[in-house]
Image: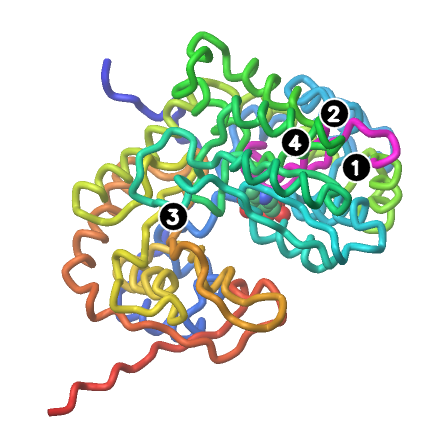
Amino acid sequence: MKTIIEPFRIKTVEPIRMTTEEERRRFIKEADYNLFSLKSEDVLIDLLTDSGTGAMSTNQWAALMRGDESYAGSPSYYRFEAAVKDLMPFKHVIPTHQGRAAEQILTSVIADGHGKGKIVPNNTHFDTTRANFEDAGIDARDLVIAEGLDTALEYPFKGNMDLEKLEQLLAVEADNIPMVEITITNNAGGGQPVSMANIRGAKAICDKYGKPLIIDSARFAENAYFIKLREDGYQDTSVKEIVREIFSHADGMTMSAKKDGFSNMGGWLALNDDEWAEKARARLIMTEGFPTYGGLSGRDMECLAVGLEEIVDEDYLQYRIRSIQYINEGLDALGVPVMKPAGGHAIFIDAKKMLPHIDPLQYPGQALAVALYIQGGIRTVEIGSLMFGRQTDGSEKPASMELVRMAMPRRMYTQAQADYIIECFEELRNNTSKIPGLRITWEPSSLRHFTAKLSPIQRRRPTI
Ligand SMILES: Cc1ncc(COP(=O)(O)O)c(C=O)c1O
């Protein structure tokens, strides 16, 4: 059989409230043209994020009832710890309420009160990772390969770290680099995977300079499945074994379990180094909770333990990757400039190419995201100059790419809904020249894309 079907059936449904274009124009104006400020009830297809938005399985719901809410030493913690160690055999597993809490704790360990002057290289830092480092004064440096910045280029591992640049940076700045990080898959760079050879290569460079390699692991299973599909020598290796190999090359990980943990909430920091783990736990107790629950309830940890077994199921991963490709191919056939090849969790549209009349500092990605909402009630997110344009010195600089991300929640939407998304673009593509750019009317001091207020720029009519 050629058709890949959803390897599940639906038991509980959540109704979607239909809205009209006129209503949506009003809702987005009331939300100051920021899609984060919309009420989710006013959204038809919510592709804002794949984080914590997936559907849980019957086994996960059943596991919730097993949750033991003891403050210390809960069996739910030990089941969670065993499930993590089965895939990622790190010595210390420190639960947190979500990924950014793990990042914050790790940042406090490496900054050690003196972040300024330190540098952390990464293929591409995600926004919260960057914000945590920069808040501590650490320079968050992106070293993704050049192929990763060309949205149209078909290349199997566009998330790879530029190992030559990494080596050059370490050769000059080793004393200021407390750790090296790799993000799998590379979310901010289009959900593109990192090859095992690249992870191995980065580890060899880290070893040469005595630096730990930490993996930002939110989408580890999708990355492992891409390795199985695309990297020579892994076709006959199970995804579970590939995952184990990935983490065998690392000294620690941060995890947002809201993605490839199949959970609505959760995360962890895992480390091999005893001294770092001790400092991390001291911080954890101050900010999250006791080390056997961190920021999680017992039932969250039970749910996660089951989620980690389900996420490496290869029938699921085949469906997952195919369902993203399906939309990518549909949009590509319409001439929409999508990132190629399709990423693991999302479809990325090159807004700079789709809306060439909008200057990068009038946020073409946000303008497209707003237009998509008005057109079809689809909520997406901008990954471009609105997210990354504000510099730490207060100046503004265009981001390297102006993308719109359509992140697919896990096990959530059907193929008819995927076809609806494609149809929205079909309607929109003939009117793109009328989509206006935006200006910011208010912004907070950091992570501005979450709460900034914007307004459309009225274009002056040409005078004769
Ligand atoms: C690659 C990556 N790292 C870290 C995070 C932060 O995780 P959380 O949202 O659980 O705080 C995210 C969230 O989207 C992510 O995509």
Check the image and tell me how it is coloured: rainbow
- How far apart marks 1 and 2 lie (CA) works out to 10 Å
Please provide percent x and percent y for residue 238.
50, 12
What is the count of numbered marks?
4
Q: Secondary structure at mark 3?
A: strand
Q: Secondary structure at mark 1?
A: loop
Report the span colored magenta: 251-276
Please name whichever residue, 146 or 269, is drawn nearer the observer in this view of the structure.
Answer: 146
> Quarter of the image containing the C terminus?
bottom left
Q: Secondary structure at mark 4?
A: helix
**Which disc number belongs to residue 406?**
3
Is the C-beta of the residue carrying label 4 under 8 Å from the nearest atom of ligand 1?
no
- How far apart marks 4 and 2 lie (CA) works out to 16 Å
Sooner in the amino-acid sequence: mark 4 or mark 2: 4
Mark 4 packing: few (<14 Cα in 10 Å), some, or many (20+)?
some
> In this rendering, is residue 364 above or below 55?
below
Q: Where on the image, by quarter, is ligand 1?
A: top right
Residue lying farthest to the top in this orientation: 236
On the image, numbered disc 4 is attached to which residue?
64
Is the C-beta of the residue carrying label 2 under 8 Å from the nearest atom of ligand 1?
no
Q: Amino acid at mark 2?
A: Glu
- How far apart marks 2 and 3 lie (CA) works out to 32 Å
Sooner in the amino-acid sequence: mark 1 or mark 3: 1
On the image, numbered disc 1 is attached to which residue?
293
**Which disc number belongs to residue 81?**
2
